[in-house]
Amino acid sequence: MTITPAQVRSALLARREIAIIDVRDEAPFAAAHPLFAAQIPLARIAVEAPWRLPRKDVTIAVYDDGEGLAGQAVAQLRELGFTRVEELEGGLGGWRAAGYELFEDVNSYSKAFGELVEHRRGTPSLPAGDVQALIDEKADIAILDARRFEEYATMSIPTGRSVPGAELVLRAPVAAPDPDTTIIVNCAGRTRSIIGAQSLINAGLPNRVFALRNGTIGWTLAGQHLEHGRQESIEVGDGVDEARARAREVAYRAGVRRIDAGQLADLEAESHRTLYRFDVRQPDVYAAGHLSGFRNAPGGQLVQETDHFAPVRGARIVLADDLGPRADMTASWLAQLGWDVLVLEGGFDGDLATGSDGAPPPRGPEGRYKRPYEGTDNPAAAMQAYLDWEYGLVAQLERDGTHGFFVI
């Protein structure tokens, strides 16, 4: 059985559940794929598919680009118990022949959404040279790195401190308690800088807030020095109640709904819908105690890598967080990304599970696409080409027409 590109597109437009799975290695996937495609290489299907596709009767459209992988993947998925697996008619070439848009890189729709946010909200940013000048003159600034801590420790902006994206509303007031302090949010490229800065603006922090334009790529292209091995982070302070109120208001504006444990049980009983349950706290906090059945997806990365954590477009997502602001801010962005997302109220006062969530082991380097924003040894031309690609994503979203994003 096959499914046509037009049928896949119709499912996306109607917001019916569908997983579009590219079974090539990551490098060819990064060269061209449909907007909402997720990548699971053929060699990883047995390991990743049961984890990433939790409902066995969800519609799955599998494709390659003529390499002969898709048929093998369909057979493997059926052996794993998936009952509605179909090969995309014509593969990637069929999608292209239908006149539908193809996107590059990885986590493409999250990155495209970040560009749309900046385009529609005019998220303020500062170029690398201006930020360096502020550092040199010892201006009253706080540079907050919104990436994962490991990325921050690998390379960071001088004086920068680690505050992963979903933690910003909680921890930025600790880093910059004086409202006259200017906050600058950075990442490696653009998306997490934009989303992080706009999160603080949406939450109504009194500080002036900027994204570092083009992140560490822009810093490197400007010929400026990056630091390595920094270990500075910001702890949660006393302002949790204020952060909670700010984040809830943002979530409300984005249309996020709240549920209790009983309502969650009702959703879990609906076997005709895919349900993802994510605890959006940092891995060490999650491991110390979490709700059974909830997987760990730190909020900033969940927004950045939604296609990895939740490849079933049209599924429901429930978020949990013992303090609240991380779930509310993450949910606000997922709602704007077109997801049916809810926040679980409470639940952390009972028995909690500990340890990891049992996610499949990470992939090795084989078949991996080297990101232009990783490290400082990439050719300048590759880094600039990556930025140029990101600048064009807003127009590409409009041509594609399936995204359903909105920006509050």
Image (cartoon, rainbow, N blue to C red):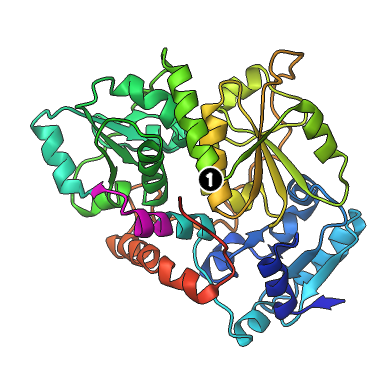
Please report the bounds of the magenta region as a residue range: 115-125
Q: Main secondary structure of the magenta part?
A: helix
Query: Which residue is found at the position 47% from the left and 18% from the top?
Result: 241
183 or 158, which lies in front? 183
Q: Is residue 301 visible?
A: no
* Residue 120 counted in the magenta span: yes
Q: Is residue 122 visible?
A: yes
Give the crowd class for mark 1: few <14, some 14-19, many >=20 residues within 10 Å: many
Q: Residue at x 40, y 58 (%)?
A: 115
Q: Residue at x 68, y 18 (%)?
A: 348
Residue bearing the label numbered 1:
254
Quick one: quadrant of the N terminus? bottom right
**Outermost residue, bottom side:** 97
Query: In screen coordinates, is 35 left or right of 370?
Result: right
* Depth check, front residue: 307 or 113: 113
Q: Position of residue 72 (x, y in %)?
A: 82, 67
